[in-house]
Image (tube, helix red, strand yellow):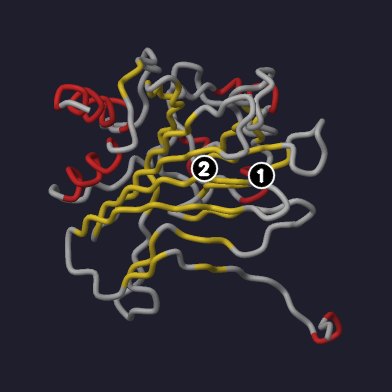
Amino acid sequence: MNRRSFLQVAAALPLASSTASGLLLPARAESTAFDRSIVRQIARDAAGKPFKAPDSKLPDNLKNLDYDHYRAIRFLPEHALWRGEKLPFEVQFFHRGFFYAPRVDIYEVANGQATRITYRPDYFSFGSTPPPSPEVDLGFAGFRLHAPINRPDYYDEVCVFLGASYFRAVAKGEIYGLSARGLAINTGEAKGEEFPLFKSFWIEKPTANANSIVVHALLDSESAAAAYRFTIRPGGTTVFDVEMAIYPRTNLDHAGLAPMTSMFFFVRTERSG
């Protein structure tokens, strides 16, 4: 990749994700050259500058959603990325609101070109919450991958990226358990834990016979920026191959790579073995 190509992509990122109010008319989706080195270059460049808090501004009716109202906002499967193309994966998106206020920009990568996926309110049903204006470009909160791992005629949810740097996955015949994080900083520290977040994703369009999918992610926080490349292989055992490069802004004295976490109810009567 040459310098001109990188500068085009680096310039496109803030155009897509940063505004004074977070409420812009949807920009025309323009494609820029993309390869696996670009996210590392963006992360390295970001780490050389002061941290900028994510865009968390939302319309008034979405600012203070409770759990039930947020849960009622559902992505409509007929709008899934690659729906009807007979590919082994589809992508659905999560709406912003509740705990998930920070804007996340998501790009489709095809034929060496990255194109931002523009938010549209008609991708969702909103329950009793009034939908935002069609002119508002909110971005997304995250996404989930679907693939036919349990039966050939149904695309199961197999992987979710939602909230901070959290992600989780399931295998054939299983249900969700542990969640993972891209990076943990100052866990258990008296001064308070820092929660890095994935602020942008690039999802590579799979071929018709692919058994894996590649997702690139840009992470950012007060202490570091980082680039990730996930190769995800769902099936009887779902496997994540993860490549990462961390670019600290400060000394990372208490950092954890690939930390796992979960919460569950437990009573003695349900203990087996």
Query: Which of the pair 56/150 is nearer the observer?
Result: 150
Q: Please provide percent x and percent y for residue 120.
A: 52, 21
Residue 40 image offset from top left, x and y in percent: 27, 43
* Mark 1 / mark 2, whichever is N-terminal: 1
Q: Is residue 244 above or below residue 252?
A: above
Q: Nearer the viewer, residue 18 or 154?
A: 154
Residue ID at (17%, 58%): 249
Q: How far apart in space, not on screen, are marks 1 and 2 (Cα)?
A: 10 Å
Residue 21 occupies quadrant: top left
**Residue 143 image-quadrant placement:** top right
- Counting from the top left corner in percent of width and height, residue 34 is at 33, 27
Q: Secondary structure at mark 1?
A: helix
- Note whether 154 is above or below 208 in the view shown: below
**Screen quadrant of the C terminus:** bottom right
Q: Which mark is residue 71?
A: 1
Badge 2 crowding class, 10 Å Cα cut-off, few under 14, some 14 to 19, many 20 or more, is many
Classed neighbour count for the residue bearing mark 1: other residues with Cα under 10 Å, few (<14), some (14–19), many (≥20): some
- Residue 187 place in picture, x, y as percent: 38, 74
Instruction: Report helix, strand or loop for mark 2.
Output: loop
Q: Which residue is mark 2?
A: 97
Camera-nearest residue between 24 and 164: 164
Disc 2 marks a residue whose amino acid type is: Gly
Locate the N terminus by quadrant. Answer: top left
Looking at the image, residue 165 sits to the left or right of residue 190; the answer is: right
Looking at the image, residue 22 sits to the left or right of residue 41; the answer is: right
* Amino acid at circle 1: Arg
